[in-house]
């Protein structure tokens, strides 16, 4: 027959006591330079912000200088074109140099002459523009001014040619 095990009261389970090691002293993070690292990071951000601000100011200043240069060229160009339109000094064959001062048959062909001269003058002033942005802005302005001046020459030539036939 099978035997049932009997509990022996003298045998006891041995429990091994667990000892926890004493907690080691942990130095603060500042001892490893975290404050210094954070200060350097903030300093780097401040320097970067100063650089960004300076860059924006330099770009804005350059844009203002470009705009001023375009305005100066525009003013010179308009003065040059006005002089070519309104110059009353006698030119070849005693015909006034200014296209709008030519009268009767002397006005005939003024538009063709103005177109040729205007393209040369425009090219001359476009060559004075330094940057691409200046060229784009100046081209629009000069083209608009030339269109208006050409319309005046065409109207004047038509009016004077009509007078010559009357």
Image (cartoon, grey):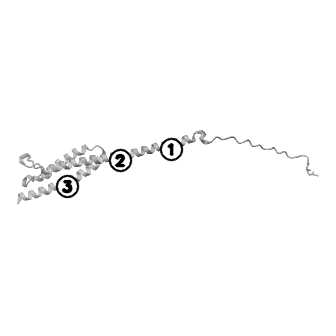
Please state the horizontal and vertical placement of residue 11, each as a whole percent of the image: 89, 46
- Disc on the earlier residue, 2 or 3: 2
Q: 120 or 22, which is in the foreground?
A: 22
Whether the residues at callouts 2 and 3 have beta carbons within 8 Å, the answer is no
Find the residue positioned furthest to the bottom. Answer: 166
In the rendered image, which quarter contains the C terminus? Answer: bottom left
Name the residue carrying label 2.
60
What separation in Å lies between label 1 and label 3 (alpha carbons)?
58 Å
Q: Which mark is residue 42?
A: 1
Please name the residue shown 8% across and 52% down the image: 106
Camera-near label (2 vs 1) is: 1
Please name the residue shown 17% across and 54% down the image: 150
Q: Is residue 137 visible?
A: yes
What separation in Å lies between label 2 and label 1 (alpha carbons)?
27 Å
Please state the horizontal and vertical placement of residue 153, each as a whole percent of the image: 15, 54
Please state the horizontal and vertical placement of residue 121, each as a whole percent of the image: 19, 46
- Left or right relative to 6: residue 21: left
Please name the residue shown 28% across and 50% down the image: 137
Q: How many labels were placed on the picture?
A: 3
Whether the residues at callouts 1 and 3 have beta carbons within 8 Å, the answer is no
Vertical arrangement, residue 152 with respect to residue 43, above or below: below
Give the structural element (helix, strand or loop) at label 3: helix
Please state the horizontal and vertical placement of residue 8, each as a whole percent of the image: 91, 48
Q: Which mark is residue 148?
A: 3
Q: Quadrant of residue 19?
A: top right
Alpha-carbon neighbours of circle 2 within 10 Å: few (<14), some, or many (≥20)? Answer: few
Vertical arrangement, residue 163 with respect to residue 122, above or below: below
- Left or right relative to 16: residue 143: left
Alpha-carbon neighbours of circle 1 within 10 Å: few (<14), some, or many (≥20)? Answer: few
Camera-near label (1 vs 3) is: 1
- Disc on the earlier residue, 1 or 3: 1
Q: 165 or 149, which is in the foreground?
A: 149
């Amino acid at each position: 027959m099978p035997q049932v095990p009997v509990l022996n009261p003298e045998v006891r389970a041995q429990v091994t006591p667990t000892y926890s090691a004493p907690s080691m002293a942990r130095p603060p993070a500042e001892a490893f330079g975290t404050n210094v690292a954070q200060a350097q990071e903030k300093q780097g951000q401040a320097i970067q912000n100063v650089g960004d601000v300076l860059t924006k100011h330099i770009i804005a200043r350059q844009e203002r200088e470009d705009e001023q240069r375009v305005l100066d060229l525009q003013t010179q160009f308009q003065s040059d074109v006005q002089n070519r339109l309104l110059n009353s000094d006698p030119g070849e064959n005693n015909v006034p140099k200014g296209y709008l001062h030519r009268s009767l048959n002397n006005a005939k062909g003024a538009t063709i002459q103005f177109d040729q001269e205007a393209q040369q003058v425009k090219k001359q002033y476009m060559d004075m523009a330094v940057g691409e942005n200046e060229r784009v802005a100046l081209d629009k302005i000069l083209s608009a001014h030339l269109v208006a001046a050409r319309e005046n020459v065409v109207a004047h030539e038509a009016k004077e040619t009509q007078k010559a036939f009357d």
